[in-house]
Image (cartoon, grey):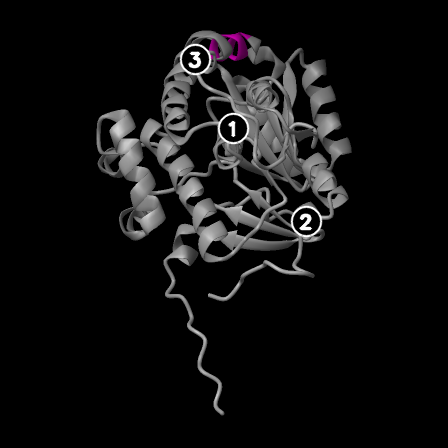
Amino acid sequence: MDTHTHGAGAPKTAIVFPGMQPTAFSEVGRFMLVNPYARELFARADDTLGYRLADRYQRAEGDYSLYGQISFVVNCLALGRWATERMGIDPVCVTGPSFGARAAAVHSGVLGFEDAVTMTARLADTMEDYFTREHPALVTQSIARVGREGVELLRGELEERGEWSDVSCVVDEDFTMLTVHESVLEWLQRRIRALGGMAMYTMKPPMHSYLFDGLRDRVAEEIFAPLTWSDPRLPVIADQDGRTVTTGEGVRDMLLDGFVRTVRWPSVVDALKEAGVERLCVSGADGLFTRVGCTTRNFRVLPVTPRSAMRPERRRMPVAA
């Protein structure tokens, strides 16, 4: 595979670590067990956790199991290293919408790998406990093909019904995630379809809302406080507003803000364009943020997935004299 980008005239590239999507072990197991970068990182994760992560991931149930979450972070980091070392990707910055911000913190040098593994495991347990106790009736609904005016119309109708809502994520001009009470889900999905939209994935537990300040405070005190937060080697673009973060403390606060602030991917796109980025190296499986129009219109997207990393490398044929 000849995709080296060093030298004059090379396109400015950002590494993007995607938000987590449901991924079966069968889709990534071969990469985890065979790819040298993945094998090294999974061995280190096993030492940190005290058990063999791949075995537990293979047996786990549900879309977002504890073992699936940790494995997703490790796979993304292995792919990021593979891209920089094997493909010669020389990024000018790094970003990670939603769940991807964790891998971005490691790849940029803010968090050590072992700290990130421990953090991800503890976050999964803490979030499950928090949402079970504090907000068991909330879900986050993904809404496609409905513009911002339509989303505001839906929110106004919810308010008229005496129902609460919050915008958790803006993926594109016509793709939004709205957090609501589960009891209004059937009505909301019906209204989305009536507006010509599509009611996509429903997430439970929910995410990214000002209501979750109790979770933010708990994570800051119980999980983040003991960790070492170094200044990043690469600038980190925050997924909430596209600001450039250049301190370890700033990245820590960015991760904490991820619990309570809306993710706004179009703001990240604007920041990357302003920085002169032309290409996105997407390190991990992504079916959302780097697939939408605001991304594909503005950048060349280079997907680096477990499947693509396992393809045999093409060797250059010698030129005949």
The residue to which callout 3 is attached is: 226
Q: Amino acid at mark 3?
A: Pro
Q: Nearer the viewer, mark 1 or mark 2?
A: 1
Q: Quadrant of residue 11?
A: bottom right
Contact (Cβ within 8 Å) of mark 3 with mark 2:
no
Q: Earlier in the sequence, mark 3 or mark 1?
A: 1
Residue found at x 50% / y 66%? 2
Disc 3 on helix, strand or loop? loop
Q: Which residues are magenta?
A: 214-219
Q: Is residue 317 left or right of residue 55?
A: right
- Between 89 and 137, the one lying in front of the other is 89
The residue to which callout 2 is attached is: 293
> For the residues marked 1 and 2, what is the alpha-carbon distance in whole angstroms?
31 Å
Q: Amino acid at mark 2?
A: Gly
Q: Is residue 51 left or right of residue 144?
A: left
> For the residues marked 3 and 2, what is the alpha-carbon distance in whole angstroms?
40 Å
Q: Give the main secondary structure, helix, strand or loop, of the magenta stretch.
A: helix
